[in-house]
Image: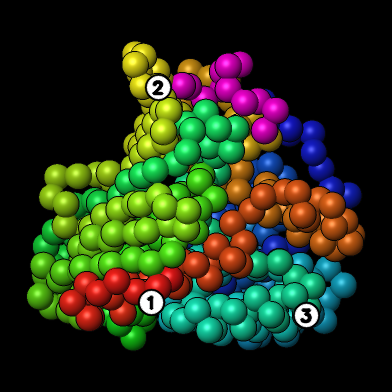
């Protein structure tokens, strides 16, 4: 079971940029970060409208003077306080991530940022260098990687249960944007606007989630890829609402990625299947408590979260908020990640390098590779699906 007795002398004082009234992502961050008592929300710049920001902040329990009109004002004012924020989460549109993250690091703050963390890998590398100079940590919100069964899958690959990895099939293919809903939905409009979303839509928005599951579970690195992408809703061009990517990994394995917002009738269809020389595993985010395990020549097995036959000596596998059989889901996965972010932020403050080195988080390198995936897919697709080096 999860270690709810783990505490700091004081919770990490934490602020947010974006994620105001009506934001599902903002609520997800607040719910997850504070669930285990390791973070405390004390400040925010939640909205471009200062009055609306202040009203919202007060309604969720903040002091009026700590609800700021913008992130610049928040970072400046909080730096003058003895009880100022130590970390910040960034839940704003893609085009703002780089500048806000850069400003946060310069203000001496640890960062949790939505992905893609920047528009270009050069910008992401710059943030990595700045974080190292400031001795701060950047966490990237790959929210599905907190599920215990993802860590079980990773451990099974590492222990050789599957044999040599040969094939990885990745997909995140929902159907909710099969028509031009952005004409009436401002929250979708920015996602299909290049100046705000960046050079991709579904590759950056959801494809990076599936891709990072592959990186995390297998540890393999892509050597080259080929991408084709489509704008089935013509007004979304040049951004794609469907994409197929073929990949070759260092060491000889191969993979495919399907990212789509026009898979009509589908809820999420985020799945990953890892095929080895001895066995395969498959995980589906709509049934996150189960991992399908198939050994050649034997009946398929369904492994369930919270059970003693799992690799419970791995903290990520054991990180269940409730016993097996009960349904854990999205918020628990996010909470597991924020728990890990807290441990690494706190250890960094104490110069506890052993903890920093041994607690896994989706950090800046995960963010860099997500941005690079977008760049390379665009490069390939714009050159008639040519193979490009990763």
Mark 2, other Cα within 10 Å: few <14 / some 14–19 / many ≥20: some
What's drawn in magenta, residue-wise? 303-314
User: Image quadrant for the N terminus?
Assistant: top right
- SS type, badge 3: helix
Q: Which mark is residue 375?
A: 1
- SS type, badge 1: helix
Q: Earlier in the sequence, mark 1 or mark 2?
A: 2
- Marks 1 and 2 in Cβ contact (< 8 Å): no
Query: CA gap, disc 3 to disc 2?
Result: 47 Å
Residue depth check, mark 3 versus mark 1: number of the one nearer the observer: 1
Residue depth check, mark 1 versus mark 2: number of the one nearer the observer: 2
| Secondary structure that dominates the magenta span | loop
Q: Earlier in the sequence, mark 3 or mark 2?
A: 3
Query: CA gap, disc 1 to disc 2?
Result: 37 Å
Asked whether the viewer can see residue 106, the reply is yes
- Residue 154 position in % (x across, y down): 54, 39
Query: CA gap, disc 3 to disc 1?
Result: 26 Å
Q: Which mark is residue 295?
A: 2
């Amino acid at each position: 079971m999860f270690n709810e007795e783990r505490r700091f002398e004081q919770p990490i004082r934490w602020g947010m940029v974006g994620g105001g009234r009506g934001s599902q992502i903002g609520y997800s961050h607040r719910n997850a970060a504070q669930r285990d008592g390791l973070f405390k929300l004390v400040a925010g710049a939640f909205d471009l409208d200062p009055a609306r920001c202040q009203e919202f902040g007060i309604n969720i329990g903040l002091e009026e003077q700590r609800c700021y009109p913008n992130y610049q004002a928040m970072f400046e004012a909080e730096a003058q306080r003895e009880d100022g924020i130590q970390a910040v989460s960034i839940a704003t549109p893609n085009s703002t991530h780089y500048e806000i993250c850069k400003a946060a690091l310069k203000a001496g703050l640890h960062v949790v940022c939505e992905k893609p963390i920047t528009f270009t890998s050069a910008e992401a590398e710059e943030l990595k260098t700045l974080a190292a100079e400031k001795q701060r940590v950047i966490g990237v919100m790959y929210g599905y990687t907190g599920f215990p069964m993802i860590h079980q899958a990773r451990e099974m690959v590492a222990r050789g249960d599957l044999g040599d990895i040969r094939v990885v099939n990745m997909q995140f293919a929902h159907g909710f944007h099969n028509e031009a809903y952005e004409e009436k939905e401002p929250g979708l409009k920015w996602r299909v606007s290049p100046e705000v979303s960046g050079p991709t839509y579904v590759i950056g928005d959801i494809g990076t989630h599936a891709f990072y599951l592959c990186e995390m579970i297998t540890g393999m690195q892509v050597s080259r890829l080929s991408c084709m992408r489509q704008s089935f809703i013509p007004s979304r061009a040049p951004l794609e609402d469907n994409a197929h990517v073929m990949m070759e990994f260092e060491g000889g394995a191969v993979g495919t990625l399907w990212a789509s917002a026009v898979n009509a009738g589908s809820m999420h269809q985020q799945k990953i299947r890892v095929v080895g020389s001895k066995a395969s595993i498959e995980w589906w985010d709509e049934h996150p408590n189960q991992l399908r395990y198939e050994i050649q020549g034997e009946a398929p097995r369904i492994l369930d979260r919270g059970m003693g036959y799992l690799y419970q000596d791995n903290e990520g596998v054991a990180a269940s908020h409730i016993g097996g059989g009960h349904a854990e889901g999205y918020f628990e996965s996010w909470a597991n990640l924020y728990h890990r972010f807290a441990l690494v932020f706190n250890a960094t403050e104490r110069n506890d390098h052993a903890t920093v080195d041994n607690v896994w988080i989706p950090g800046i390198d995960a963010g860099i590779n997500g941005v690079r995936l977008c760049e390379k897919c665009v490069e390939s697709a714009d050159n008639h699906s040519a193979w490009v080096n990763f």
